[in-house]
Amino acid sequence: MSTEDRREQLLDAGVELFGRRPYDEVSIDEIARAAGISRGLLYHYFPTKRDFVVAVLRRAVDVVTALTAPDPELPPVERIDAALDAFLDYAENHAAAYATLFTTRGGGDPEIRAVMDEGRERRVDILLDGIAGQLLADGSAARESPVLRSAVRGWISFVEGMLLRWLAERDLDRDQLRVLLREALIGAIAAAGRVDPRLGLAAGPG
Amino acid sequence: MSTEDRREQLLDAGVELFGRRPYDEVSIDEIARAAGISRGLLYHYFPTKRDFVVAVLRRAVDVVTALTAPDPELPPVERIDAALDAFLDYAENHAAAYATLFTTRGGGDPEIRAVMDEGRERRVDILLDGIAGQLLADGSAARESPVLRSAVRGWISFVEGMLLRWLAERDLDRDQLRVLLREALIGAIAAAGRVDPRLGLAAGPG
C-alpha cells in the first residue's frame, strides 16, 4: 500500500471509530488495531494522537462539505432540504463524534478550534453562493453583505445547538427537525434582508 | 466583613477581572490582589482556581438572567429588544469573558459545561414564558411543544455564534445586530409554528 493510500485508510478508520465512540476515550492501540497496523507504523504517520484527531477532523469536514454541496439543479427550498438531509444522515451516523466535538469544542484545543472554524466559514460561503443568492433579487450582493454573512453564520450555530440537543433528546421526528432548520435558514436570510435593504430581498420562496 | 459578604465581593471581583482578560490567563495571585486579600484567604473560600471560575460563572449567569428578564409591561417586540439590549450591554462590557467562554467551552470541563447548559435551559424557559407565549394564539402551549423548545434553544446558539463573531469583527453596527437577533427569534418561533400547527401561531407582531 502506498504511503498516501495508507494515510487515507487510517483517516477513514478514524472517522468510523470516532463516529461510534468519543475520541478522548479511544486509545492509540485501538486505532492501530482497527486499521490493522502496528502502533509504531501509526506513529510514523501521526506522531501524536492529537495529530491524528486533527487530521480525522479535517477529513470529516471535507466529507461533510462535499456531501452537503447544494445541488444547482434544484429549486431553492428543495436544495436546502437535500443538503440538510445529507448533513443529518452524516451527523446521525457519526453521532458520537458530533456530540463530542460540539460539546467539548476539542477541549479548548486551538488547532481543533481552527479546523472547526474553517469548516464553518466554508459552509457560510457555500450557503451564500448556493442558497442565499437564490432567495435574493440581486444574488451577487450575497457575498458582500456583513449582515447576511452574520445571519448565515448565526444559523450554522443554530444548527449545531439544535442538533446537539436533538441527538440527546430525540423529541422531534427527523422531518420536523429538517423543516425547522430549513425554515429557520429562510427566516434568518429574510431577517438579514430587512436589516440590509441593499440585499433587495425577493419574495419568499414558499 | 462576614463570610457571605466576602464571598460575594470575591465573585464580583472575578466577574470584573475575567470580563477584561481571559480567565485562563489570570493567576490566583492576581485574583487575590484584585480582591485585596491574601492568597491563603482566597483558598479558604475557593480551594482551587477552577472552583473560583465555576462560582464566578454561576454568578455571571444569575446576573445576566436577571438583567435580561422580559418586561411584561412592554409589547412583544419591544420586550425582545429591551432584553437583547441588556444582554448586548453585558456581553460588550465583559467581552473577554464572553469570548473565552464561548470559544473554549471551558476547555471541555464538565462542570463549566453544566453551568452553561443550565443557563441556556433557564433562558429557554424565560423566552418560552415571556416572549414566545405572547406571539402564539395559545400562549399556554408554548411550554408543551418540543418543536418550539428546540427552535428557541437553537436561537440561543444562534445568538452565541453570531455574538462571538461580532465581538471579533464588529462589522455590523449594534442596532443592526440587535434587529437581526430579534428578527431571527421571531423567525424561529414562526418556523416552529409552521412545523407544529398545535401552537396556533398568531399573526406576526410587526
Image: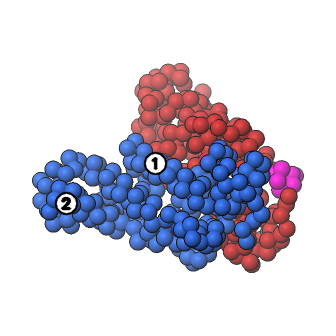
Chain colours: A red, B blue
In x, y percent, where is residue A7? 56, 34
Viewer-closest of B131 and B155: B131
Report if residue B188 is visible in the image: no
In the rendered image, the quadrant that contains the C terminus of chain B is bottom right
Q: Which mark is residue B6?
A: 2
Does B192 sit above or below residue A197? above
Q: Which residue is mark 1?
A: B118
Choose between B131 and A161: the one closer to the eye. Answer: B131
Residue A204 magenta-drawn? no
Eyeballing the image, is A59 above or below B45?
above
Secondary structure of the residue carrying tag 2 is helix
Query: As drawn, is B34 to the left or to the right of A159?
Result: left
Q: At 44% from the left edge and 40% from the top edge, which residue is drawn?
A: A50
User: Height in image: B95 above or below A25?
Assistant: below
Q: Nearer the viewer, residue B40 or B96?
A: B40
Q: Residue at x 22, y 50 (%)?
A: B46
**x and y, in percent, of residue B33 in the image:** 17, 65
The residue at 87%/52% (across/down) is A73
